[in-house]
Structures are given as structure tokens and as C-alpha cells.
Amino acid sequence: AQSVTQPDIHITVSEGASLELRCNYSYGATPYLFWYVQSPGQGLQLLLKYFSGDTLVQGIKGFEAEFKRSQSSFNLRKPSVHWSDAAEYFCAVGLMEYGNKLVFGAGTILRVKS
Amino acid sequence: DVKVTQSSRYLVKRTGEKVFLECVQDMDHENMFWYRQDPGLGLRLIYFSYDVKMKEKGDIPEGYSVSREKKERFSLILESASTNQTSMYLCASRLTGIEAFFGQGTRLTVV
């Protein structure tokens, strides 16, 4: 079965430090890949997406992610975290061969300490 | 501006009631989804639909059904609500090949 794994449930980083959130997927072909962010009490906002082409994609709010086919990974990075980045982050994969099914990981909660 | 609208933000229902959650999108998207969101479990797919009158089970369909009679509307039905269905329910829509757009969610409490 298709699955998305975010191995870190919680991550705490200091403001100004770099950040990497991990995401691995289990799927035979290359899926569409997404990162969403959800601030407390808010809806889901798209950070970035990968469909094809350059494996390093840039998103909003200074985030980027790199697709590594050999590792089935799509890790999210930010060079310098701001306190406003504290939120929950979800990785998702879109599966064309399964009726456009969209599967999410369990999420990673980011805490930022000053 | 894209818009996915869920009919209620908060809902309280009694055990055994039949519950309807409605979702409407104005973007002419063919694909629509219902998820439930629980702490530590992320978004779990209940059902999705890739066309009018078409539906597919997601990962946790038990206790739920759906209806898609018109392209813009996707309804989630809890045939007999139970306390373990207390959750946040999120509706989403997308065109094939692009990202999904989400509604604001319905927080359902079953008492």
C-alpha cells in the first residue's frame, strides 16, 4: 500500500537555526510531492510542490525541498528559522495511478525557541 | 480566488444520529477528498471522488459514505455517528496534476 512517513513527530529548533524535516514515501513510480503547513487554528497552506524537472524546488516563506528518487525522499529545509514558522508540517504524495489519490504523512510539529 | 467551502465549522451530534458534512468547490475540479485529522495521525483519507457519481474508498472508510451528484459538491455521511468519529474533518479538491485546496474544516463532536 502507498504510504508517507514523517519520522519526526516533534522538532524543536532555535530561532535562526537551520531546519530539515524528513519525508519518505512508498510508491512504485514517481508521485507528485507536496509540503503543506498548518498554523494553530488555521487551514492547510501549500508551501511547495514537485511534479517533474529540477529536483530542488523553492517554495514560499523561504522553504525549499529536494526530491531524491534513490531514497524515495522529499525533505523540507529552511536555512534560518523564524518564530513564526512554528506550526505543523505535512508531506503529501499525489498518485496518478490510483484515481488521483492524495496521501498525507502524520505530520511534524515544529517548535521554535528564542 | 480558489474556494472550498465546508458547510459548518463546528458541529455537535448525538450518538446514533445520521450526520451530513457538505463541501462545495467553485474551481471546476474533478477530484474531491474527505479526510479526518487527529493529533499524531495526520490527515487520513476517508473517501475520494475523481468524477461525478464516482467514489473510491480511502484508508479509513468504515462508518462513512459519500455522495457526489454534482461536480462542485461532495458530501460525507456518517450513517450512525459514534464517539470515535469525533474529529476534525477536512474537505479538499484538486485538478489532476496540481495541488489540493482545502476547506477550513469541520470540527465534529459526537456525544
Image (tube, rainbow, N blue to C red):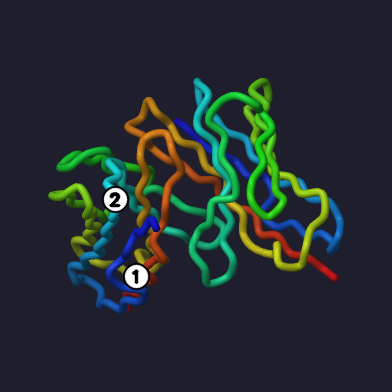
Q: Is residue B72 left or right of residue A106?
A: left
Residue B104 x %, y % = 41, 66
> In terms of depth relative to the viewer, which is nearer, B40 or A74?
A74
What residue is rendered at 65% in x and 32% in y?
A: A73
Q: In the rendering, at what x and y percent does residue A104 appear?
A: 50, 45
Q: Quadrant of residue B18?
A: bottom left
Element type at mark 1: helix
Of pointers 2 and 1, the one earlier in the residue sequence:
2
**Circle 2 marks a residue in which chain?**
B
Q: Which residue is mark 1?
A: B83
Q: Secondary structure at mark 2?
A: loop
Whether discs 2 and 1 lie on one chain: the answer is yes
Residue type, numbered disc 1: Thr
Instruction: Specify the quadrant of the image occupied by residue A23.
Output: top right
- Using the rendered view, name the quadrant where residue B63 is placed: bottom left
What's the distance in space between the residues labelled 2 and 1, CA to CA?
A: 14 Å
Q: Quadrant of the C terminus of chain B?
A: bottom left
Q: Amino acid at mark 2?
A: Glu
Q: Does A2 sit above or below residue B72? A: above
At a point 51% along the width and 36% down the height, the residue shown is A3
Residue with the mark numbered 2:
B62
Query: Image point 47% across, 53% down: which residue?
Result: B43
In the drawing, does residue B88 fall left or right of residue A70? Answer: left
Residue sitting nearer the eye, A99 or A2: A99
Q: Is residue B9 above or below residue A52?
A: below
On the image, the x and y values in percent for residue B77 come to: 22, 59
- For disc 2, the neighbor class at 10 Å (few under 14, some 14 to 19, many from 20) is few
